[in-house]
Amino acid sequence: MKSSAIAHSNIALIKYWGRSSELNIPMNDSISMTKQGLGDIELKAHTTIFFSKDYVKDVAFLNKKSLVDRNKERVLAVVNPLREMAGINHKFMMASTNDFPTQSGLASSAAGFAALAIATSDALGLKLSKDDVSKYARLGSGSAARSVHGGFVHWHQGVDHETSYAEQLCGPTDFQMNAVIALVSDEPKTTTSDSGHTLAATSPLNNAQIKKSQEHVVELKKAILDDDFKTVGSIAEENCKLMHAVMETSKPPLYYRNQDTFKIMKKVEKARSRGLECYYTIDAGPNVHVLTRPENVEEVEKMLKGKTIRVKPAGDSGTTEEHLF
Ligand code: PMV
């Protein structure tokens, strides 16, 4: 009853912000690209879980540190329902490592909980489809539902646990898009996305953002399948601005973007007006993902200067024979 899995992080093109329940049921559908770093940093999580009758309590480690409180609760939110489904009472030991720059806000939790859900269902001998596994990854972190799949992924909002799941829209090579991440800051963020979601409803712009995002999902899905990069980039950029408007007008306001973020946004807009096809998107942190066609990656890096990570669409996440303990 031991299994290990590897999963990659993802960048949301249509954002998930705000949820209607503790089960992380979102307020709208979302779409993302599962991403893999092209250099030394792969942006992946590697997780091993072992259920044994010899263990007396559940223990979990992330990068060798023991998880407690909310962080441990989130692990249990994924493992408990699967353990119950399998009808097994054994306690577990879990270890997870990742290669994300420390507290960079690059969605390490998405990769971590996706790897956890895959390894757990495999260790317990559950024969679940990837779409079904995504429901359990969602219980740890909403965006983790999307990291269960590689390539481009659609998370259906749904109305309850059974209907809120992620499915692959197309594989990693079906739509030619890369991203260059501009690492503008490594300061820890003051409000995690986990607690930020609860503030979305306090913004007067929230309903407009939800409505527009549902329209964006339909348009973006079509644009990906039509290989229409320009439309994908423009919609992703607009959707990102709407989400940050909600964050910045919630009570209290959440400012994830800083001055350096705005400098990069302007640089991207300027480069685009000069004819370099690129668009930005920003999750719950100051770093900027600049979306571009693979052939323009080098030019985008030159334009951005500073610290960057080059990413391409990642393949499927899955189990591995390499165990961490
Ligand atoms: O899955 P969470 O709770 O870390 O929330 C992710 C929120 C955003 O990254 C801002 C948007 C998204 O859809 O990934």
Image (tube, rainbow, N blue to C red):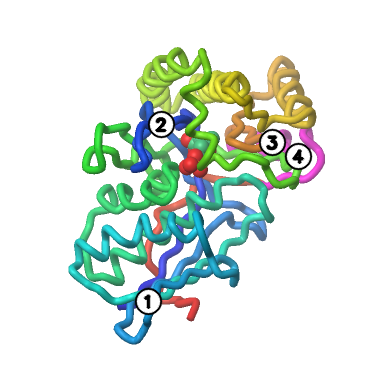
Say which amino acid is labelled 2: Ser
Residue 202 is covered by the magenta coloring: no
Which residue is at a point 73% across and 34% down the rendered structure image?
Answer: 299
Asked if the residue at label 1 sits under 8 Å from ligand 1, the reply is no
Q: Are marks 3 and 1 in contact (CB under 8 Å)?
A: no
Mark sitting earlier along the chain (2/4): 2
**50 sits to left or right of 89:** right
Label 3, label 2: how many angstroms apart (C-alpha)?
21 Å
Query: Which quadrant holds residue 16?
Result: top left
Residue tagged by mark 1? 50
Query: Which quadrant holds residue 105?
Result: top right
Residue furthest out toward the right: 306
Mark sitting earlier along the chain (3/4): 4
Mark sitting earlier along the chain (3/1): 1
Which residue is at a point 63% across and 56% down the rendered structure image?
Answer: 100
Near-viewer residue (224 or 2): 2
Say which amino acid is labelled 4: Val
**305 sits to left or right of 2:** right
Mark sitting earlier along the chain (1/4): 1
**290 sits to left or right of 2:** right
For mark 3, give the secondary structure. Answer: loop
Q: Position of residue 15 (x, y in %)?
A: 48, 30
Q: Are marks 3 and 2 in contact (CB under 8 Å)?
A: no
Say which amino acid is labelled 3: Pro
Label 2, label 4: how many angstroms apart (C-alpha)?
25 Å
Residue tagged by mark 4? 184
Which residue is at a point 55% across and 46% down the rendered structure image?
Answer: 107
Residue tagged by mark 2? 30
Residue tagged by mark 3? 286
Q: Are marks 3 and 4 in contact (CB under 8 Å)?
A: yes
Residue 169 visible, this angle: yes
